[in-house]
Image (spheres, helix red, strand yellow):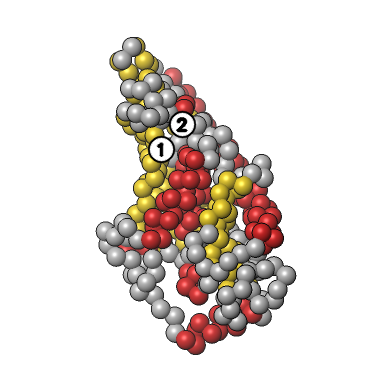
Amino acid sequence: MAKDIELSESESKFILEALRQNYRLDGRSFDQFRDVKIKFGKEYGDVSVEMGNTKVHCRISCQIAQPYEDRPFEGLFVISTEISPIAGSQFENGNITGEDEVLCSRIIEKSVRRSGALDVEGLCIVAGSKCWAVRADVHFLDCDGGFIDASCIAVMTGLMHFKKPDITVHGEQIIVHPVNEREPVPLGILHIPICVTFSFFNPQDTEENIKGATNSEISIIDATLKEELLRDGVLTVTLNKNREVVQVSKAGGLPMDALMLMKCCHKAYAIIEKITDQILQLLKDDSKERNKYAAMLTSENARES
């Protein structure tokens, strides 16, 4: 994904030597996740997420479609990712087949749909004929590492914030009611999976397993772009607040033992718990603000009539 970005030999040595001495360029500790800033747009399901200099925008939408033949009682969920030059000069315009971009889409799709986070059966309208097709469009606006983690937060927050139009079904006829006529309906979210990515460095350049007990291997959480370019291995774990491991993704790199995997999951849980509480509080505050605004409009309309 960052094939056109190259670090000089001196800068690479400086970053690795700093890691050996337990320092990171941005001042964070090895186990510290960047502060997450979440903002909602005017429409339901419009979410922007910032993690340091990394910025991701997600827009949730839906339309009525036909379900898959082998899953007549389920709705559809699709993720579309787009990386454009606005995120960085290293990205080629229109390239939608980059390995990292495909990997990001697959990890989020597994985290949301295959884990049962989104109630796809609740999207069914008429079995085998009509259902809701929910789409998440993820746009990468600025790149400084951590795209998978930021995208997962944006998609899950967007799904929880989104509301689909209410409908009335008369046989095969479906009437979609506009928002000003009927209150829209939220999606069924059963749990909130969050991704946390670990990066591993092996300064001694050996092929031994990554073990938490040794001093030769270094692991950090939420790497920046420069740290990602120098890492020897990567691991993405997806958990929810119920301590359920939803997914483990390790795309090549150094081999890892079970003890290290357990330690990573334990570290990730504390981060996921904090982010989940932050998302729920922001959704609560946004709901209050929208209800307050709606009440003001209602009272104004009553006075005018």
Query: Can residue 277 be seen here?
Result: no
Q: Which mark is residue 259?
A: none
Residue marked by disc 2: 120
Which residue appears farthest toward the left when viewing the image? 94
Give the position of the C terminus as an image quadrant: top left
Which one is nearer the viewer's eye here, 123 or 38?
Answer: 123
Q: Residue at x 68, y 56 (%)?
A: 262
Coordinates of residue 49 in the picture (x, y in percent): 48, 53
Amino acid found under the numbered disc labelled 2 = Val
Q: Residue at x 33, y 70 (%)?
A: 89
Q: Is residue 167 above or below residue 85?
A: above
Mark-to-mark CA distance, 1 and 2: 8 Å
Q: Which residue is mark 1?
A: 77
Q: Quadrant of the N terminus?
A: bottom left
Crowd around label 1: few <14 · some 14–19 · many ≥20 (10 Å): some
Q: Position of residue 86 (x, y in %)?
A: 34, 63
Q: Amino acid at mark 1?
A: Phe
In contact (CB < 8 Å): disc 1 and disc 2: yes
Query: Helix or strand or loop: what does disc 2 sit on?
Result: loop
Residue drawn where x is 39% and y is 55% of the image:
102
